[in-house]
Amino acid sequence: MKTEEAMALRFEHRDTEIDVSLVDRVWRTRSDAEETMTSAARTCWHLILSRAQGRLLASLRGPETRATTAPVPPGTEFLGVRFAFGAVLRPHPAASIVDGYVPFPVTESGRIVIGGESWEAPTFENVEHFVRRLQDAGLLVRSHLGNQEQIAEHPEASPTERTLQRRYRAIIGLSQTAVRQIDRANAAATMLRDGLDWRPVVETLGYFDQAHLAHTLRRYVGCTARELQAGHFAAMSFLYKTHPGPGS
């Protein structure tokens, strides 16, 4: 179990004890004061629960194609479940919530309505039970799209390749090119945060030059290289784990 800090927010996160093809991270935090938080672009979707003054809110946040900022209300507890790349919640495919979210109804007793059924809200400690119940009900599944599947992305692609492209987008919500760009940007941000100079980052990850890296960081991470090296980063950006997909 690890913790990371961003401004006044302190994040605690852990891996899960279930099949990593469905969930790879659980996190929580609490806001003590009103502030704004930036999160990096991401290829996976999250279940986000928040509690404030005894009221529970639940939503599904989709993949995001650029860094975003949002106000964080004070006195609120947050729980997040980051689902693995390729996991599918059947009532809400990732392609339908790219750069968006879906609010879930919450009953008076504090149960979350998903797929027409109410479910006991998970806690940081028992997320595994919640996920298994969704899986047993057939609502949460792992796609058959292999991470190592090579998909050509050019106008001359064959009919089979174009079919695979459409299937990839339908499951993931993003093109394979977008996935590679987001993964690479988050990898660069992590390297800079860990103290590397921009030069080895550019060389290792294949950026053209410092300007190319800087543009990518602004778009996908929302921080400059200097801010990352100085430790001024949004912790949500680094709760992100890149996946070993094609071309990564």
Image (spheres, rainbow, N blue to C red):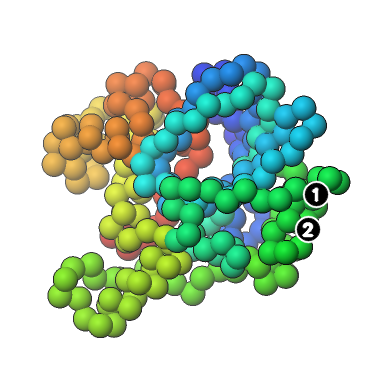
Q: Earlier in the sequence, mark 2 or mark 1?
A: 1
Please give the name of the residue rendered at 62% of the width and 16% of the height, measured from the top-left corner.
33
Q: Quadrant of the N terminus?
A: top right
Name the residue at the bottom extreme. Answer: 159
Q: Position of residue 68 (x, y in %)?
A: 42, 35
Q: Amino acid at mark 1?
A: Thr
The mark lying in front, picked from 2 and 1, is 1
Please report contact status of discs 2 and 1: CB closer than 8 Å, yes or no: yes
Q: Residues within 10 Å of mark 1 (few under 14, many from 20)?
A: few
Q: Gap in Å between the C-alphas at discs 2 and 1? A: 8 Å
Q: Out of 112 and 27, give the one closest to the viewer.
A: 112
Q: Quadrant of residue 35?
A: top right
Say whether residue 94 is left or right of residue 122: left
Residue 210 vs residue 90: left or right? left
- Name the quadrant of the C terminus: bottom left
Q: Is residue 126 visible?
A: no
Q: Position of residue 202 (x, y in %)?
A: 20, 38
Residue 107 numbered tag? 1
Secondary-structure class at tag 1: loop
Q: Position of residue 240 (x, y in %)?
A: 47, 43
Residue 118 tag number: 2
- Hey, what amino acid is under mark 2? Ser
